[in-house]
Amino acid sequence: MTISLCKHRFPLIAPAGSLFRPVDCTNCGLTFAASQTELERQAEQIRLHTAREGHCEYCTRSAVVFQFQREAMPWDLSDPPVHWLCMGCWGEAAQTADGLTYSEISAALDSPQANPFARFVFGGAA
């Protein structure tokens, strides 16, 4: 869960030849970068406050586990599942979720041998 700092919309502009990108809010003066930084800080606080002793769902080690939930993808029928991962697996999951293209995700979901960790993060299968 995240709390938005600004109830105004961040408008999108499209300069010639580029992708859409958000711009600062004109009503309250909050920059898009500042709002993203605050949302990341909130997510970190939630992650730290929900940490508990348990077993990592990926490597099955007994350790302090942290909540991990990737961004929703077009193939998700509901919210992505929440996984409880040890610190090492959490970092790898975050890098995997941020670093793969749709074609790489598709390859991982189609072939379990290609990238089993990506299959776990995006498909829920170990």
Image (cartoon, grey):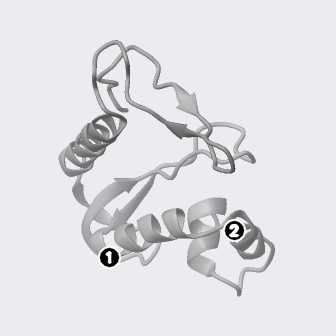
Task: Classify the position of the C terminus by image quarter.
Answer: bottom right
Furthest residue to the right? 110
Whole-Å distance between the Cαs marked 1 and 2?
Answer: 21 Å
**x and y, in percent, of residue 124 in the image:** 62, 60
Q: Nearer the viewer, mark 1 or mark 2?
A: 2
Tell me if mark 2 has few (under 14), some (14-19) or many (20+) residues whose alpha carbon lies within 10 angstroms of its own: many
In the image, residue 93 sits, relative to residue 9, either above or below, namely: below
**x and y, in percent, of residue 92 in the image:** 42, 74
Dot label at residue 123: none
Residue 118 visible to an observer of this rendering? yes
Location of mark 2 (residue): 105
Mark 2 lies on a secondary structure that is helix
In the image, residue 17 sits, relative to residue 58, either above or below, namely: above
* Callout 2 amino acid: Ile
Dot label at residue 88: 1
Residue at 56% in and 64% down: 121
